[in-house]
Image (cartoon, coloured by chain):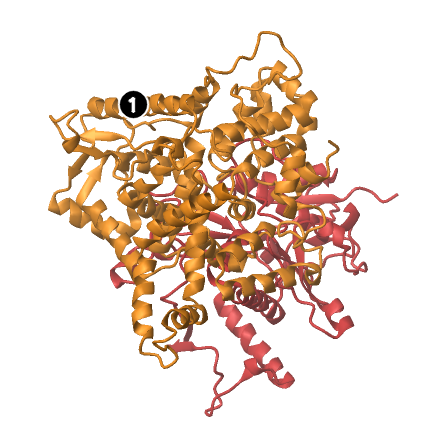
Amino acid sequence: MAGKVKWVTDIEKSVLINNFEKRGWVQVTENEDWNFYWMSVQTIRNVFSVETGYRLSDDQIVNHFPNHYELTRKDLMVKNIKRYRKELEKEGSPLAEKDENGKYLYLFVSQSNKEAYVISLYINNPLLIGGRKFDLRLYVLVSTYRPLRCYMYKLGFCRFCTVKYTPSTSELDNMFVHLTNVAIQKHGDDYNHIHGGKWTVSNLRLYLESTRGKEVTSKLFDEIHWIIVQSLKAVAVNASPSLTSSTANDRILKYNLINDTLNIAVPNGEIPDCKWNKSPPKEVLGNYEILYDEELAQGDGADRELRSRQGQSQGPRAGRSRDSGRAVLTTWK
Amino acid sequence: MLQEESDLSLIIAQIVQKLKGSNLYSQLERQAWASLQRPEIKLESLKEDIKEFFKISGWEKKLQNAVYSELSVFPLPSHPAAPPEHLKEPLVYMRKAQGSWEKRILKSLNSMCTELSIPLARKRPVGEQKELLNKWNEMGTDEPDLSLFRPVYAPKDFLEVLINLRNPNYENGDSLSFRTHLGLIQVPLKVKDIPELKECFVELGLNTGQLGIDDSTQVPPELFENEHVRIGQKVLAEQDSAAAQQYIRQGSPTALRAELWALILNISSEPEDVLYYEQLKTNVIQHDLLVDSLIYKDVKLTASNDDYYFVFEDYLYQVLLCFSRDTSVLSHFAYNSASPPKSYIRGKLGLEEYAVFYPPNGVIPFHGFSMYVAPLCFLYHEPSKLYQIFREMYVRFFFRLHSISSHPSGIVSLCLLFETLLQTYLPQLFYHLREIGAQPLRISFKWMVRAFSGYLATDQLLLLWDRILGYNSLEILAVLAAAVFAFRAVNLMEVTSLAAAEAVLADLSTLKVMPLLQIFLFATVT
């Protein structure tokens, strides 16, 4: 009978440790024989840097791909997009269109003094809800890169600005209006400790369908999913999501997120085996949905990307927290 | 059938009378005059031709919708000689109870006024007016000191009043029998039992497709959803209120809901309506009312802390502050057992010429009132439309949830319906809860008073309110409350205190209302 999975982490977060312990996994140190290492970003860099030449053995997995940070740093994204675009050109994809000067149409990079700056186009008429700007926090898990298999967590959320949006330039100085990062919002006077200004994505969907109609909303979500898949194809992976929880609701969400993540990444709780490469069965997905499965896609001949039929049926799980005890999801006490 | 005929002609006369004063009437007049230019209108057959023109141009449909709207809202007169109080509430003891309750509320409001030395109303100085106008879209950022204000009453205060209601003509006898009602409500009103509810809510049956059940991801959309959406679009194209009301009994597709509700409530956003709303806004800017602080406090305590509705905080002020000043709301008191509170200009107490209604719309908000508006923000983001929809929802439905009356959709009947359903179909559970001092109504009352707003997930709430509109009745709230208890019966049987029972029923956010209702009504052995 196979032994228990041995785990290590250098991030002391309860949402992680409780998930490992509940599976009966054994904690070890990094010098010992380990199967699963949840690494911080710093450790990843050291582990996979050229100098150390560290190689994972067949029964080891970690929570990041080596070049994960390429997805989250805009400058590296540019490099990857350029390279990806060359590939797309070979395939004849419209993304690789060039204008009459032979310059690529869809990306602008400003160069001055040999330093390349990336300027993202600032949209000054963003979609507002209740007069506020918001951003989307979506969790995507990539279990294998070749073939590309990625999953989107259904319970993503939006984070709202506490202050009303105004396009006037004087407000450009007001950080609270334009940036929605929770870390910054927390220091604004208006920060409400009970809910941290968040909505679930399914709530957002309900609102958009109700006020703008189904076609537009479905198109929006399709496009978001498409962008995600394309970005992943251009690079590889995901960086470290924040595991600090700001509210009780948040803790529950992240706990369940890690739970579902581990169910997919370490199936059946068995010691990982890199030869095991099958798609996991539907039941283990939990709150993840298949975003893109290259194997399935190539098998069908059709792109099996995430359908827009997400609807409300799963219900906004990370909903009200007026109390203790939730019938379905684990409580956090 | 002379009686029926005379009843019908009376109803027709009343509706005509009502519509004569409406905007629609003047529009129809204008259209009729304008149509005289048309070639197909001939002098010899003027009447028929104009009628035909109205039919083709859709104006007849608008008139039909208006008539239908009146029929839905206005109660049918029981007898031509019935005095106006009977229209408000036929039973004397109910009228009296409502009167006493109102006196108490007013006393509470006045004493708060005196304690805090704040006038009921005051004109704002020009500087303050300017400031408020600038801040109109973000009144939520204001942090006035509301610590001294308290809500005029909370649902549980109201419940105590209802518990003490008695019909002086009704003799129950001292001996307990199987007829004895074991709940908190002790008035003999007629409520439906499950067989009658099944007849009434026949479209919720197991063999009929429903949104909220048959649109889940496991069910292929070809089976029900696609066709239902198609029919919904057709109903909207026809602009037929009655058809929309029938259609929505099976639930509304998300994308069509805003329009369907507007059609059923007969709301169209004419320029006059927008203007009217702007006028109300001006009233808010110019005068400050004491109830404004109550509204602020309520929003801050309830909607601002809600996971779904916190985003719409500012809309709530924009709707509720205007609502308080809307004197057109006063007309609903003709069929509401409540009456608007009267206030007198300083020093002129008792002199009718110096009496004003306070607040101008006659409605004093209580704790949780803003939750009636909050779910609507998911459907309408244009303030004047949002306002109109809310106002209509209030004068058709919500007012019944906090006034004492014998109406089948009134809160008293709903409470009695809830308790009777529980006692009849879940006697063991009911008895157990009673024994441990956890009378079920004490837990479910707040759900019903708020029409479940703030307790259910938004998408579920909207599916529930679809059916309120579809059946033009609030009885479904009582049925759902009973269905929730039935669903959690196993856990409830194990609790031994009111607090523990409350805990079992504290979180309804994961419930799916349509399956619960269906199972309770159609799949439980009775």
- Which residue is situated farthest in the right direction here? A1
Q: Nearer the viewer, residue A212 or A100?
A: A212
On screen, residue A123 above or below B200: below
Residue B512 appearing in the image: no
Please give the count of numbered marks on the rendered protein: 1
Query: Residue B44, percent across and down?
Result: 36, 76
Give the color of chain B as drawn. orange
Amino acid type indicated by mark 1: Ser
Q: What residue is disc 1 on? A: B108
Say which quarter of the image contains residue B296: top left
Say which quarter of the image contains residue B225: bottom right
Q: Nearer the viewer, residue B124 or A153?
A: B124
Query: Residue B146, percent across and down?
Result: 28, 32
What is the letter of the red chain? Answer: A
On screen, residue B165 above or below B460: above
Q: Check the residue under mark 1 and report the chain it is in.
A: B
Relative placement, left or right, of B54 versus A258 is: left
